[in-house]
Image (spheres, rainbow, N blue to C red):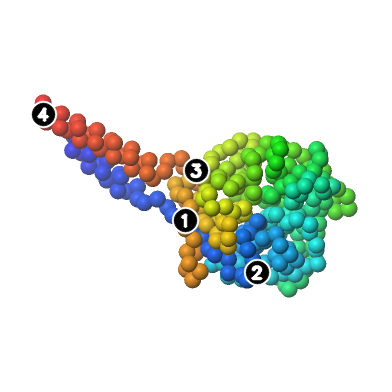
Amino acid sequence: MLQTVVCALAAWTLAAGPAVAAPQGFSIQVSGVSAPVGMAADTDGNCYWVTDGSSRTTRTLVAVDAQGRRSKEVSWQAMPTNVQALAWSDSSLFVGDIGDPTASRKSIQVLSPQALDGSATSWRAWDLVYPDGPHDADAMAVSGRGNIYIVTRGDSPAIYRAPTELSRDSDNTLVRVASAPADVTDAVFLSDGKRIALRTRDQVTLVDAYTWKTLATAPVSPSGGDAISSTLSGDGLQLAGSSTTVTGMSLPGGSTSATPTPSASAAAPAHSDDDDTAGIRWGTLITLVASVLLAVAAAVVVYRAK
């Protein structure tokens, strides 16, 4: 009987298989583009829009493919003040002109180019104001329904939501919906539309977009970086570093952590987790199974001794 139990446990351990790898990252190979402050996965064009906040990437919008090579460039005549974030929703790119380190702007602005398949484009723009005075912000997320969320920094960091119906002729007053972790540098809605990933310099926090409760957290490399994006397949995250390196990461609560960026010539396939919210990590599973096997083996010895 005991031998049967041992064999069954061993077979189950082998059947569990190895942990699923995190999505592959890439290195941005576009001259003049430095460490991104904003990044967005364009699931229509199969590319990532990136901005480092400079005029090089705000007067001309730049996209790269999954290997970091230049994919698209679109020029426009918009003159934003301080771009800190990008977001993708419903086939539209959103540009977050939301930075205000001196807390002196009367309003911030979100812009959206009307075409991304040509060399130049017009755009829509919405002016947003906080209900409690100016704030600095680095993070913006846009839901699948097009609702805009801004995450502030500094004293009393918070998440603010823009009105569902936005006016292009007058200011749109934001509504404070929840407190936020300190020093959030970027944010992104996950593909299910129910969760938001918030990035700080050392952690990614997954929150419920309805209750604003924290669902899971995961550490990130202390080497720096601001931007976060979903993967093109929607099953993981991409985190920009302090240079042009972008690192793939499984969703917090999954079974893997960040995967190193390959060389510039390497392919970058994305791999999905079997269960995005499974709390058991592979190392813990191995430890648990080993403990059970040792206990059973000890029981065998005792049984035979008797």
Which one is earlier in the sequence, the residue at label 1 or at label 4?
1
| Of callouts 1 and 2, the N-terminal one | 2
Label 2 to label 3: alpha-carbon separation = 36 Å
Residue type at mark 1 is Thr
Res 253 label: 3
Alpha carbons under labels 4 and 2: distance apart: 74 Å
Task: Indicate which disc, 3 or 4, sits on the residue closer to the N terminus.
Answer: 3
Can the viewer see residue 255?
Answer: yes
Q: Which amino acid does label 4 sit on?
A: Ala
The residue carrying pointer 2 sits among few (fewer than 14), some (14 to 19) or many (20 or more) residues within 10 Å by Cα, namely: few
Determine the secondary structure under disc 2: loop
Tell me the mark number nearer the camera, choosing from 2 and 3: 2
Q: How far apart are marks 1 and 2 (CA)?
A: 26 Å
> Residue 32 — which label?
2
Q: Nearer the viewer, mark 3 or mark 1?
A: 1
Q: Which of marks 2 and 3 is nearer the N terminus?
A: 2
Which is in the foreground here, disc 4 or disc 2? 2
Write the residue at 64% across / 44% down: 183
Residue in front for this viewpoint, 167 or 259: 259
Mark number displayed over residue 259: 1
Q: Distance between the residues labelled 3 and 4?
A: 44 Å
Location of residue 161 in the rendering, given as x and y in whole percent from the top left corner: 74, 43
Residue that sits furthest to the right in the current view: 169
| Image point (88%, 50%), residue name | 170
Q: Are the residues flagged by discs 1 and 2 in contact, CB closer than 8 Å?
A: no
Which residue is rendered at x = 28% and y = 39% of the image?
A: 290
Q: Nearer the viewer, residue 30 or 124?
A: 30
Indicate the secondary structure of the residue bearing disc 3: loop
Q: Disc number at residue 305?
A: 4
Q: Nearer the viewer, residue 261 or 275?
A: 261
| Local SS, label 4 | helix
Mark toward the start of the polypeptide (4 vs 2): 2
